[in-house]
Amino acid sequence: MVSGRFKSRTYARSQVRTPGGGNVLRHTLRKPKKAHCASCGNVLAGVARGRPAQLKKLSKTQRVPTRPYAGTLCSPCSRKKLIEKARQQQA
Amino acid sequence: MFKVGDVCVKIAGRDAGKTCVVVDTLESGLVLVEGATRRRKCNTRHLEPTGKSLDVKKGASHEAVMKALGLEPVQRKPKKAGEKPRVQRKATASGAPGTQERKAPKKGAAGKAAKPKAEPAGEKPAKAAPKKAAKRPADAQE
């Protein structure tokens, strides 16, 4: 029987053909989905995907771009926000 | 468009959101910028003008610009021009004996190319030769 922990949908199932010729079910953890921009919803470029344990191994610069609003907003949206900020400071 | 002394805010790059002053305009249309940002060439599309203007000389130093902005100058590591260039790969320059034997026929061509360059700049053959040597085995395999 399949052990209870594999029944969760965070595991993906795949059929694997063994060298002996038999078929075997393998369970692998799914990767989390890509990060999206908080305002326009586009996929964010340069943001690493992985489970917490995998992300911990990466350095901060490997996880996210080096830019204000890096992991939250896409580059066009962050530019709009910075322009807004600059104009507010003027006024 | 942008004049020397214009105060701007950078909207792109890792310096985004920081105030800077235009310190020189270049022929290519780019602009030299200094201030809370790094001293660098920048596209005018990546700058948001604030409408303010400061009295700053063309090509002003970091301290002069920060004084005009009313900020404290940032401590920066001075760039050393004569420093060793980056990674030396299976290099003809450093001369590991095993690699030299393998690359002897190709090394001649790289050596010939490197020699005329050797005199004007001491660093360049060290950079140029390893790149050429690294490419050759790939070409030979194909």
Image: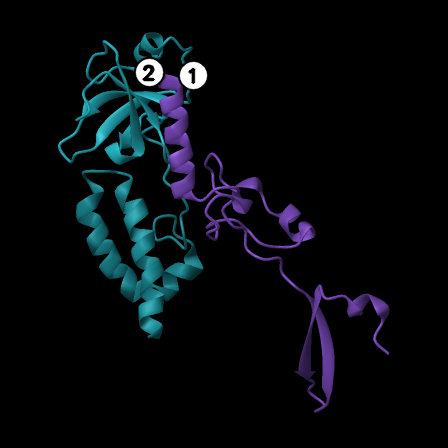
The residue tagged 1 is B74
Residue type pointed to by label 1:
Val
Report the Cα–Cα distance between label 2 and label 1.
8 Å
The residue tagged 2 is B62
Q: Position of residue A27 (x, y in %)?
A: 72, 71
State whether residue A33 appears in this view: yes
Q: Chain of mark 1?
A: B
Q: In the figure, A6 relative to B99: above or below?
A: below
| Quadrant in which residue B83 is drawn | top left
Residue B137 in the figure: left or right of residue A33? left
Residue lying at the far front in this picture: please name it: A91
Q: Position of residue B82 (x, y in %)?
A: 32, 30
Q: Residue at x 31, y 21 (%)?
A: B34
The scheme the figure's colours follow is by chain
Q: How many marks?
A: 2
Check whether the beta carbons of the residues at disc 2 and disc 1 lie within 8 A of each other.
yes
Could you tell me which secondary element the residue under label 2 belongs to? helix
> Which chain is painted in cyan?
B
Q: Nearer the viewer, residue A86 or B107?
A: A86
Q: Residue at x 35, y 67 (%)?
A: B137
| Quadrant in which residue A80 is drawn | top left
* Quadrant into which the N terminus of chain B falls: top left
Residue type pointed to by label 2:
His
Could you tell me which secondary element the residue under label 1 belongs to? loop
State whether residue B17 appears in this view: no
Colour in which the image shows chain A: purple
Q: Residues within 10 Å of mark 2 (few under 14, many from 20)?
A: some
Q: Chain of mark 2?
A: B
Residue lying at the far bottom in this picture: please name it: A21
Residue B122 in the figure: left or right of residue B1? right
First along the sequence among labels 2 and 1? 2
Q: Position of residue B119 (x, y in %)?
A: 19, 40
